[in-house]
Image: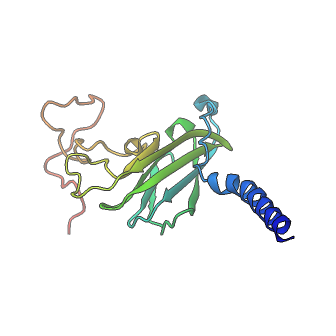
């Protein structure tokens, strides 16, 4: 009489394990949606931009930089725990200028994930695994970072790195705007202290 009970228990156990195992095995990453072309930049309207960043892994020193307006780039250093999503917004005239950069400190490794939405439509999404290294990557300034969307170095109103300061003569070999007034060397360029 004990044999039918044992066989029934064994059958119930196998059925239970079969029903539970697909849920346990489904730990794959969420699929990243394909980018959808955003609104045209020529419409002259302001566009709401949503930036989302996630760091899957244990990593310190996360730095997230993103464009919040046509002339301003902002940075945040939130505590990024696995599964936590950082989200912020901005307003841009040209949605093609929406850009973001996520970076973590060496020697940590993690999966960096970013997503940019313009007017609730995904326009950029990326994911990159940053592998561990024994030594810092001196030859790769982008090691430990993920760039998403437009580069952040072209903020409107920002001077190029090699441009002279206002009120100073241009560097040798650079083009000069003939309509621009030349600085008077007798007048100090800045406030007198």
Residue 44 position by quadrant: top right
Q: Nearer the viewer, residue 41 or 83?
A: 83
Residue 24 position by quadrant: bottom right
What's the coloring here? rainbow
Q: Which of 126 and 6 is in front in this view?
A: 6
Measuring from the top left, give residue 171's x and y in whole percent: 15, 38
Say above or below: 7 vs 68. below
Measuring from the top left, give residue 49's x and y in whole percent: 60, 47
The answer to whether residue 75 shows anywhere in this view is yes
The residue drawn where x is 85% and y is 64% is: 4
Q: Which of 80 and 95 is in front in this view?
A: 80
The C terminus: image quadrant:
bottom left
The residue drawn where x is 14% and y is 30% is: 173
Measuring from the top left, give residue 188's x and y in whole percent: 18, 55
Could you tell whether 154 is left or right of 42 in the image?
Answer: left
Say above or below: 33 vs 68. above
Could you tell whether 92 is left or right of 74 in the image?
Answer: right
In the displayed image of the protein, which residue is found farthest to the right? 1
The answer to whether residue 68 shows anywhere in this view is no
Residue 103 position by quadrant: bottom left
Q: Nearer the viewer, residue 159 or 132?
A: 132
The N terminus: image quadrant:
bottom right
Measuring from the top left, give residue 71's x and y in whole percent: 46, 48
């Amino acid at each position: 009489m004990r044999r039918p009970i044992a066989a029934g228990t064994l059958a119930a156990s196998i059925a239970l394990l079969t029903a539970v195992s697909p849920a346990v095995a489904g730990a794959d990453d969420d699929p990243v949606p394909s980018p959808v072309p955003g609104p045209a930049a020529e419409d002259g309207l302001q566009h709401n931009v949503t930036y989302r960043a996630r760091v899957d892994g244990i990593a310190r020193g996360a730095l997230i930089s993103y464009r919040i307006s046509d002339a301003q780039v902002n940075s945040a250093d939130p505590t990024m725990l696995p599964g936590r999503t950082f989200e912020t917004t901005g307003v841009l005239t040209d949605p093609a200028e929406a850009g973001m950069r996520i970076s973590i400190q060496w020697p940590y490794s993690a999966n960096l994930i970013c997503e940019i939405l313009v007017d609730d439509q995904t326009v950029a999404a990326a994911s990159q695994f940053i592998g561990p290294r024994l030594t810092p990557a001196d030859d790769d300034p982008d090691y430990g970072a993920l760039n998403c969307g437009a580069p952040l170095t072209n903020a409107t109103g920002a001077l190029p790195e090699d441009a002279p300061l206002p009120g100073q003569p241009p560097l040798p070999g650079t083009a000069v705007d003939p309509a621009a007034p030349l600085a008077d060397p007798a007048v100090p360029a800045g406030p007198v202290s």
